[in-house]
Structures are given as C-alpha cells and as structure tokens.
Image: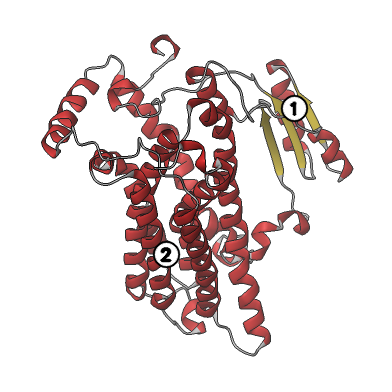
Amino acid sequence: MKSLKSINPWLWVPTLYFLEGIPYFLVNNISMVMFNQMGVPNGEMSFFTTLLYFPWALKFLWAPFVDLIKTKRWWFLTMQFLMLGLAVLTIFSIPQPDPATIAAMATEVKLFTGVLIAFIIMAFASATHDIAADGFYMLALTSGVQAEMIGWRSVFYRLSNVFCNSALIAIPGIIYDWTIKQGEQNMPLAWQVTMVITTIIFALMAVWHLFFTPRPDADKPNAETSVKDIVVGFGKAFATYFTKPGLLVAIAFMLLYRLPEGFLLKMIYPFLLGARETGGLGMTMQELGTIIQEKMDVKIILMNNNYLGMVRQWQELFFQERYSSTPMVNPSFTAIAQAYGIPTRLVNQREELDDAIADMINSTNSYLLVVNVQEKSLVYPMTPAGGAVTTILLNENNK
C-alpha cells in the first residue's frame, strides 16, 4: 500500500474540487438557462429545476452508508464515471423543438423527460460524490496538509462556479449565433455541443483521478458498524438534536434567512434572458459574462473583510488559527473603479453607511460602494467537519 505522501496533493485536490462543482452548477444553474432558452415556460422550468436540488439537501440521510460500504476513493471514482455516463445520456436526450415553438415559450416540459431523469440521477451522484470526496480529503492528508490545502480547495470549487456560470452559458449563445449565420436557428445543437464539452471534462478528470489519487490505509469500510447501528444511531441523534435549547429558532432562521435569495436566484436567469415586453432584460447568454460592455447603470456594494470568510472561520475554530491562503491582500477597489470612470466611495465606519447608500442611490451612473466590515466575525449556526447533527454550533458560547 502506498504511503499518504506518495502522490502530491496538488495533483488531485484542485481537480477533485473543481470537478465537484461542475455537476452542482450544471444541474442547479445551467439547467435553468437550458430550459429557458429551449422555450420551456418559466413556471414549469422553476418547479422542476427546484426539485433537482433536493439530493444535496437530503444527502445526510445516506452519508453513513458511504462509510459502511466500500472506500471513499471507490465512491467518488464510481460517481465520477456515473456522471460521465449521464452527461453522455443528456447529449442524446435533448429534444428538438422547432424555432417557432421555442420563440413562443411553448415547449412542453415532457419533452425533457430524459434530460430530467439524467439530471436527477446526476444530482444524487453529485451529492454522494461530495460526501466521499470530503471524507477522502480528511483520510488522505495529514492535519497539517489539510490546513494548507483547505483554502485552495475552496478556490478551485469557486473557479468551477465561475467556469460553469460564464463559459457554459456563453458557449451555447456563441454556437447559436453561428447557426443563425448558417441560415438556421438551432438552439438544441448549441446545447448538445455544450454538453459534449462538459462530457469531455468529466472524462478527462475521472481518468486523471483514477491514476493520480492516493490509496490511504485509513480509507476502508467501517466494519464495526452495521446498517442496524446506523438506523438506531440516526433515531437517537434526531431525538437528542431536537432537545437542544433554542433549536426551533435556529431552524427557523436557517430555513427563512435565505428564502428570499432562493426565490431570486431561481428566477434571475429568466429575468436576465426574458424579452423586454415580458418584463425581462432581454440579454443574450454571452452577455451575462460581459455586462460591463453594455454600460448598464449598475449599483455595486462590495462588503470586504479581507479574508475568505467561511474558510477562515474553520481555520480559527478547528485549526488553532493557522490561517493558510485565507488572508487576502486586495488592491484598492475604489482606485480600480475610478480608473473606469465609475463613481465610488469607501466606508470604514457604520455611521457613514446611510449617507454612502444615499449617494449611491442618487447617482445617475454605475456606482461602487466599498464597505470594510469586521475581519474576524463568526457566522452561526455551523456543523464541524465530520460532526453529527447533535454537535451543531449555534453560537460562540457552545463552540
């Protein structure tokens, strides 16, 4: 058996977490753009794409079984090759509605049955991959290397977000424009080519991880735990969990705090892409990545704590404040805005904030408001890595 140091973590941690993000953003974000641009009505689009998120919300239910069966490495490799097969299935499942049906936003969602089946299975596979990848990261690396790489794995996951929400949205728009120049309007072809590119990425990274991920001795099934033990443990954990003081308030906060954002994010793409006569901005897909070229009157608030906040919080609470790759040496954002001729203002004190917001709102141009916030504030509630629902941290008093 090879040692933990036999394979440099830089060979697999960045690619593992970059690939981890692709199915998540593909299923939850890119699918909305696909359905919208293929003429599926917004109501049906938002309903069915919302259902696709449930596997990530419910993955705690089968997480213990990932520990019980096979190894973490087996699980994430199996899920990667499964998602590769599902991406291939999606290519051939994309329907071919005619341009008139698409323009009328009258494409029946039942035509996407194959795509939806592929995406829902991909969602379960991706959620399982998340469980296995995070567990493998803990088993394959020493605590010191974990602290060193924790910031970078977040960076590459976010790069996956940027790639999916820019390139994978711009590519079908570019291809669609090309088909128009060829004398046809072929939106299905544009999305098929996009899925081919996604499939190639899945294939390359899955094969890479097959050969360039370690096989740590600690990565083995938990033979001491049975299915019965898991079920009984779940029951006891939930019973204990709901006895925590103030829990209902915490749950209500977690469920409701981001509820408005959830509604907004689900309809943001239909709003940006919808025709102006229907209340949308009428933007093309490739313009989503080049808003600045449109010279729009955009008001920007940049809340800057000079850290990668959540990662820094983990390093403070669980890694004895060994900050690695989280303190950020930022440029002067106000100077950058001024270089583009954009009005800007820097706020360092809470007392200045109301006046600054008023200046921004009253500006007839784009505006950048930079607000320097507390650097080391903590965000609750949170669950420690590897912790059960009974170990959730509600505030700094029980950390």
Q: Identify the residue at image location x=34%, y=54%.
A: 125
Mark 2 residue type: Leu
Relative to 248, residue 113 above or below: below
Q: Identify the residue at image location x=55%, y=69%.
A: 197
Q: Identify the residue at image location x=69%, y=34%.
A: 302
Q: Position of residue 9 (x, y in %)?
A: 54, 41
Near-viewer residue (266 or 232): 232
Res 310 visible: no
**Dot 2 alpha-carbon crowd within 10 angstroms: few under 14, some 14 to 19, many 20 or more:** many
Quadrant of the frame with the N terminus: top left
Residue under numbered circle 2: 84
Q: Position of residue 93 (x, y in %)?
A: 38, 76
Q: How is the image coloured?
A: secondary structure
Near-viewer residue (99 or 324): 324
Q: Quadrant of residue 194?
A: bottom right
Q: Tell me how many marks there are.
A: 2
Q: CA distance from mark 2 to mark 1?
A: 49 Å
Q: Position of residue 146 (x, y in %)?
A: 51, 31
Mark 1 residue type: Ala
**Dot 1 alpha-carbon crowd within 10 angstroms: few under 14, some 14 to 19, many 20 or more:** some
Residue farthest to the front?
1
Q: Secondary structure at mark 1?
A: helix
Q: Secondary structure at mark 2?
A: helix
Relative to 221, residue 205 above or below: below
> CB atoms at circles 2 and 1 under 8 Å apart?
no
Near-viewer residue (137 or 254): 137
Query: Left or right of 251: which side holds 13?
Result: right
- In primary-sequence order, the first of circles 2 and 1 is 2
Residue under numbered circle 1: 356
Query: Left or right of 375: which side holds 46?
Result: left
Res 365 visible: yes
